[in-house]
Image: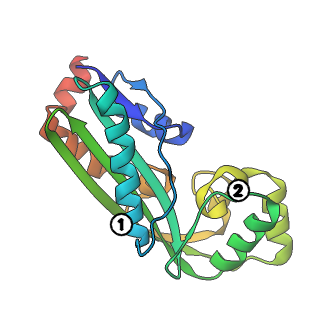
Amino acid sequence: MQIVLASASPRRRELFSWLGLKFDVVVPEVDETIQPGETPVEFCARISREKAWYVSSRMPESLVISADTIVVSGGKILGKPVDEAQAREHLRILKGSSHEVYTGYAIIQGEERVSRVIRTVVHFRDMSPEEIDWYISTKEPMDKAGSYGLQGIGSLFISTIEGSYTNVIGLPLSDLYHDLKGFGITLHTIEGG
């Protein structure tokens, strides 16, 4: 069975590789504009499904997995920063408070479909203006939702998380593996190649 990860994210590719599966990557072309009245969770679920549908419609025999991760504070989605000023704004919002990270994922193979959204709460320590400037100077915040990376330097400013660690990086592996078992993917399958 051909397994396809529908994602442009290098972090998501790395996480998915931990499953030990052979897979191809196809980058979906999806308009990621939030719809009027759409909640962050609805947006996240819809985008992950649309990514999977995009690839599945072109590769109908394949098992397609897609995901979309968002950072939400005060009901507002904090996307990837467009510049250093926006990264600074994001970090000022997040410092000294808690926020939510949602990853929506979808699995499609033929008529079988699964779609879920997993939530993790991240608690940020307070950051001084100098720490924010220093962190931005590392360039790590510039390609990450919410302007930080849990798996990198950003971990210096995170006190605790409630929920899936890998969800914050971009793919809730435990939940995903549980659902993949319904498609015939098990540790026995993985180890046996």
Task: Residue 170: give x, y in percent of width and height.
Answer: 47, 50
Q: Quadrant of the N terminus?
A: top left
Residue at the farthest front position: 36
Q: Is residue 51 left or right of residue 152?
A: left
Q: Residue at x 47, y 44 (%)?
A: 30
**Image vertical order of residue 115 relative to residue 98, above or below:** above
**Image vertical order of residue 13 relative to residue 140, above or below:** above
Q: Residue at x 78, y 61 (%)?
A: 135
**Closer mark to the observer between disc 1 and disc 2:** 1
Earlier in the chain: of badge 1 and badge 2, it is: 1
Secondary structure of the residue carrying numbered label 1: helix
Q: In which image quadrant can residue 112 be found?
A: top left
Residue 42: give its label. 1
Residue 141: give its label. 2
Task: Residue 92: give x, y in percent of width and height.
Answer: 72, 77
Q: Is residue 131 left or right of residue 5?
A: right
Secondary structure of the residue carrying numbered label 2: helix
**Amino acid type for the residue under numbered disc 1:** Glu
Of residues 7 and 125, the one drawn nearer to the viewer in this rendering:
7
Q: Residue at x 21, y 31 (%)?
A: 187
Task: Residue 130: give x, y in percent of width and height.
Answer: 86, 72
Type of colouring? rainbow
Task: Residue 37: give x, y in percent of width and height.
Answer: 42, 76
Query: Would you call the spot at circle 1 few (<14 residues within 10 Å), some (14-19), or many (20 or more)?
Result: some
Q: Residue at x 48, y 33 (%)?
A: 27
Whole-angstrom CA distance, mark 1 to mark 2, is: 25 Å
**Amino acid type for the residue under numbered disc 2:** Pro
Q: Quadrant of the C terminus?
A: top left
Q: Is residue 32 left or right of residue 24?
A: right
Residue 60: give its label. none
Q: In which image quadrant can residue 54 be found?
A: top left
